[in-house]
Amino acid sequence: MITVREQAFAVWRLAVPYFRSAEKSVVHLGPFGPYRVKEGWIGCCLLLAVICAQCGQICLTVYFNQWNAVFFDALQNKDLPTFWRQLLVFSVIAAAFMVIAVYQLYLSQWLQIRWRRWMTHYYLDHWLDDGLHYRMRLSGDATDNPDQRIADDIAQFVDQTLTLGIGLLSAVGTLASFCVVLWGISNEVPLSISGYDLAVPGHLVWIAGALALLATVGSHLIGRRLIGLNFNHQRLGADFRFGLARVRMHSEQVALMRGERVERGLLTDHFVSIVANWHAIMGRQKILTFFTAGYNQIAVILPYIILAGPFFGGRIQLGTLMQTVGAFGQVQSSFSYFVNIYSSLATWKAVVDRLVGFESQIMLARDPMSRRGVKVGQAQSEVALSVADVHVQTPDGTQLLARTNFVVEAGKALLLKGPSGCGKTTLFRTISGFWPHSQGVVALAPNARVLVVPQKPYLPLGSLRTAVAYPATAFDVPDERISDALGKVGLGYLLQSLDRVEQWSDALSLGEQQRIAFARALLTRPDVLLMDEATSALDELSEAALFRRLRAELPEAAIVSVGHRSSLSTLHHDSINLVSPLAMAQTA
């Protein structure tokens, strides 16, 4: 069970880094020109402006409460000049309140988007740093849907933190201001019970506080289950969206295999969980709403009941009655802040818990102690890649490869062969330094650049130029180099489509995608090239032509390939048969 102190520390850890940020941003100050200012300072100034606007609204509310006494006394006394004068005063108060409310909203929204932009960049920089996103996935962490954490949870955290924080400040400020007013009125109007007057200092304040305390405790007891339900609501919704996205991404395979019925069943199962969780939220929300709505209705009528005796007895004027009712309502509402926002507070806490969990997993994956796996060293001269006594296991501890050893010199090509499931692809993950369930030593040439070419290349969203230049940006690679690389891998006919934006993973065949992967290798010019069945969709003649092109363009590169075709043996200098204890056991 997380304590209030731990929760406050979590919110502090999430919120404060933005306001301490030393990142410089350009600010335009009208005719004075642009200035480069620390982003943290900008955030602090905007927050201070929003707080000042809220304090201004509290002052206007107090003044309006005093105006109530004068205005309603004028009505009771039929004082027409005072009536018109107070209407003019009201116009000034209303205009000031409108201006402050508009600019508070504007400045709050400005702060929200700047804060959200900074947090989004912060989490993206950490999540996408040095393959951290992949390490989190391979380590089997409990962080679900990181895309939803970054896209939705950050926006909700910023919005709700500002809303709840400013609301709390308003409640405290209003309580402090109106307690003084209500305490003074309580001393002027004694507590009357069955015709007896009791001199209880500040009795109206104590009544409002006691009522709100009871309501707060009741709201917590009723609504605390909403925190977990809202957490599950966000997670289940993200899982459902991810399932829909996967069907869209793999729509060709689903359609060709007539898998719509299965996909519909899987998606329906996800949605059934959403519906069940939503019904649980509805039930709990219904009870909470009954409680809070009943409490609010009692709070509206209670001050009239308390003051009915003194008013009808002629001891107070109508203006005093209305001022007291207004002040009592403000104090009661301030005391009842957590009652009125309990549902929003439950949603906000779920958002905070998800972001804290996501950040904790990022820090855990970044910790050097958590990066288990092979040791990476520096190879001897003339050796581009050395694998010494490498053991590879599955996450559950099953042995895939044991005592794997080989050396690849610069300019040489090695073919790794073995039965399916023996761990060839996992060995490439190990060499790249991402597979945590491994032991041994991998040595690379000094400052060696490693490029992995998978069986199905990844094509990012955007133009074809972006897809070919990846992992570099399209701006980093000259057009003539891109055109030359496409021509050398047999994709010259795509040159006219370089600026076309499309889902290229759907528009191009797997064979064309594999040719693009070869074009990337020509552009990247790695020292070590790891090819995982990179020509499986190509015919043998095209495969041989592409390998010869690689050898001609990258004569010093060390190539390690995984493949099953016998024709690959003639395209490599040497080959190794990998034997897996798991594969042998399955064969037996």
Image (spheres, rainbow, N blue to C red):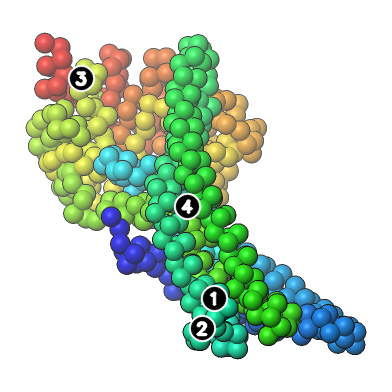
Is disc 4 surrounded by few (<14), some (14 to 19) or many (20+) residues within 10 Å?
many
Q: Earlier in the sequence, mark 3 or mark 1?
A: 1
Counting residues from the N terminus, which is met first, the one under dot 1 or under dot 4? 1
Which residue lies under the disc numbered 2? 198
Circles 2 and 1, Cβ within 8 Å, touching? The answer is: yes
Marks 2 and 4, how far apart at CA = 44 Å
- Which of the pair 422/518 is nearer the observer? 422
> What's the amino acid at mark 2?
Leu
The residue wearing badge 3 is: 418
**SS at circle 3:** loop
In the image, is residue 337 above or below residue 45?
Answer: above
Badge 2 crowding class, 10 Å Cα cut-off, few under 14, some 14 to 19, many 20 or more, is few
Q: CA distance from mark 1 to mark 4?
A: 43 Å
Q: Which residue is mark 4?
A: 347
How far apart are the two marked residues, 3 and 1, measured between alpha carbons? 93 Å
> Left or right: where does residue 496 sit relative to residue 529?
right
Instruction: Specify whether residue 330 is in view.
Output: no
Task: Answer above or below: position of 149 versus 186.
Answer: above
Which residue does the image show at 13% across and 29% down from the upper left?
Answer: 399
Residue 50 position in % (x across, y down) = 60, 74
* Residue 244 image point, x, y percent: 51, 29
58 to the left or right of 523:
right
Q: Secondary structure at mark 2?
A: strand
Residue in front for this viewpoint, 503 or 245 = 245
Q: Residue at x 40, y 48 (%)?
A: 225
Q: CA distance from mark 3 to mark 2?
A: 94 Å
Element class at badge 1: strand
Q: Give the residue type at disc 1.
A: Ile
- In this rendering, is residue 97 above or below 552? below
Q: Amino acid at mark 4?
A: Thr
- First in residue order: circle 3 vs circle 4: 4
Q: Which mark's residue is nearer the viewer, 1 or 4?
A: 1
